[in-house]
Amino acid sequence: MTLEQKKSLALFLDRAAALLGDGYLRPGESFDEPDAADGTVADGTVADGDTTGAGNTDDITAAAVDTAAGDTMEGIAADIRSCRACPLGTGKTYAVPGEGADDPLVLVLGEGPGQDEDRTGRPFVGRAGQLLDRMLASIGLRREENCFIANVVKCRPPENRDPEPTEIAACAPFLRRQIGRLKPRIILCVGRIAANAALGNAEMQSIGSLRGRFYPYRAGPEGPESPVPLIATYHPSALLRNEDLKRPAWEDLKLLRSRLDALNPRRS
């Protein structure tokens, strides 16, 4: 039996044990607890005395990074569609693994699928998704060309409620695998749920307190030496409800574009 086959068998047995128990993945599959506050200011340098509560989030463990080397987006999507690690998996119409470029400049991370997404199996396809596409286009980004769009939970919570911590934890291994495979240059979190989950914040913080700066999203002790810059902004649905939020969201998008230009990526 090869190493990959052993890993697949171990994952299957772990999931089977969880489902035969209480229906949830084991605690070891959840987001790691942040070690210390580690925010950055707008230019990407570490902010002295930052108290936003953003963690030094080693979300991608060494094992996950190793696994990602042989992972494929198709394989991850298949695992997501067959997952029953939490109750959302049994209540969905379609799981929503995500979509976009295989080699993206930006990973756009939202909260979870809504009604339109649950019906189609695609992320951000309703009114909020149409606005998101226009927001990205305003800074030269397109989901078909240089972005990948996903959510922290892959199945729709009932009545579009906020996902529970246990549901976010159940999907966390999939997100880690996606980030390890995609290796985006920047992560853009839209909405407080996505931002707090990605940053590993123990207590929920508002987007108003998190936006306007970059945070280091680290890939674990065996990951890249340089962390992935992460920036948070308002969810497009919030902009549809309150047009006063469009100006600060635009400032966040310009900050993201400036950082991309400064990185001078080869994939531009």
Image (cartoon, helix red, strand yellow):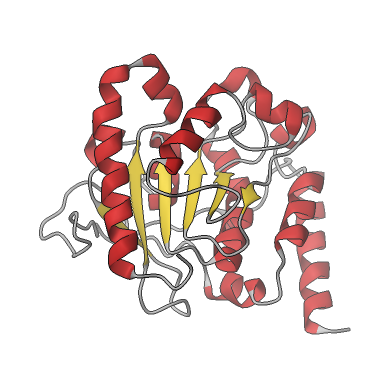
User: Visible in this render: residue 87?
Assistant: no
Query: Residue at the spot x=29%, y=59% of the render?
Result: 259
Check the image and name the residue furthest to the bottom: 2
* Residue positioned 62% across, 32% down in the render: 113
Which quadrant does the C terminus fall into?
A: bottom left
Q: Residue furthest right?
A: 1
Give residue 203's position: percent from left, percent from top: 34, 39
Report whether 225 appears left or right of 84: left
Residue located 68% across and 37% down the image: 122
Picture coordinates of residue 145, whole percent (x, y): 57, 54
Task: Reply above or below: 130 against 152.
Answer: above
| Residue at 56% in and 67% down | 180
Relative to 28, is 137 on the left or the right? left
Residue 36 found in image quarter: bottom left
**Where does the image place residue 150, in percent across and percent down from the top left?**
58, 45
Q: Nearer the viewer, residue 69 or 100?
A: 100
Corner quadrant of residue 217: bottom left
Q: Quadrant of residue 49?
A: bottom left
Q: Can residue 242 be seen in this snapshot?
A: yes
Question: How many marks overall?
Answer: 0
Which quarter of the figure is the N terminus placed in?
bottom right
Apparent side of residue 28 relative to residue 85 in the rendered image (left or right): left
Is 82 located above or below residue 244 in the figure? Answer: below
Residue 118 position in % (x across, y down): 71, 29
